[in-house]
Image (cartoon, rainbow, N blue to C red):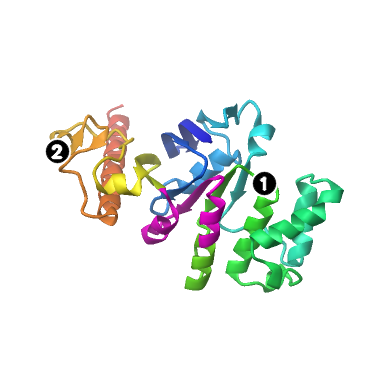
Amino acid sequence: MIEARNLTKTYGTVRALKGVSFTLESGKVYGLLGVNGAGKTTTLQLLSGYLTPTSGEVLVDGISMAKHPVEARSRIGYLPEVPPLYPELTVEEYLRFQAELRQIKKGERDAAVREAIRVGRLSSVRRRLIGQLSKGFRQRVGLAAVLMGDPDILLLDEPTNGLDPVQMVEMRRLIRELGKERTVVVSSHVLSEITKEADELLIIAAGRLVLAGPQESLTEGEGVLEVKLKDNAETRRKLEGLNVLSMEHRASDLEDLFLRVTEEAYREERSEEDEEEEDGYDD
């Protein structure tokens, strides 16, 4: 299980993430959905320990990422959108190198490499140079390397981006298998892809978590709306207690819902920026 508590990340004057909180359970695949620039990659990097939050904390099985980073990170496997591969190595050589980096005992490394090749379905390319592989195979090599540490939690940043239809199907099938015993978080900006992989969705916009819950509950109007939108008459009519989607805010389908909450969040973002500029001008 992984828990984010009020995560905030700023880069100078840019607020990339703003008070994001959620809890993810084992044995589920979570889809982290948002348009480009919404804050998905920042969220994954904070969860993995790759970045340190400006405020807030991450707990991995109850272990604080800030206080015990080595122990917490040992339970997490993070695959960035572009895996850090070495094109001059063969698949086997690269995985053996990863086994050394992860301090797998010498007597266990060969077995670990074989298992990574099996899980990643890489037997047909195990002796080929990584630089000669298609993007789909390179993604699977990166995922196989991440799995060598047998992490309880997998964070996958846009793992199907740029793949052809056959490769997408293979990657989705692999993600579903991995999610049976692990917590898996898959980010994407393509709604149709993420809904085929995920049990539950986390929709992020303008650095805020705007909606979370099982796919069915979101379209039925039961998803929890985390972002506190501006308190005006129109919003009060749409939302019940700024908490749960009201009847008027129900969407006929998930795509419509995604567009509605995303547009609402970005409207609020622009309004807040305008207010800050006015305050600065008055000063």
In the displayed structure, would residue 73 be above or below residue 145? above
**Which of the labelled discs sits on residue 234, or is there none?**
2
Q: How many marks?
A: 2
Q: Give x and y (percent) for residue 44.
A: 52, 44
Residue at 54% in and 39% down: 47
Return the residue found at the far right: 107
Horizontally, residue 252 falls left or right of residue 188, namely left
Residue at which label 1 appears: 150
Residue at 38% in and 39% down: 208
Between 131 and 269, the residue placed more toward the observer is 131
Task: Judge the density around disc 1: few (<14), some (14-19), many (≥20) Cα neighbours within 10 Å.
Answer: some
Task: Judge the density around disc 2: few (<14), some (14-19), many (≥20) Cα neighbours within 10 Å.
Answer: few
Q: Which residues are magenta?
A: 173-199
- Disc 2 to disc 1, how far (Cα)? 49 Å
- Is 116 magenta? The answer is no
Q: Who comes first in sequence, dot 2 or dot 1? A: 1
Q: Give x and y (percent) for residue 71.
A: 68, 33
**Judging from the image, what secondary structure is the residue with disc 2 in?**
helix
Badge 1 amino acid: Asp
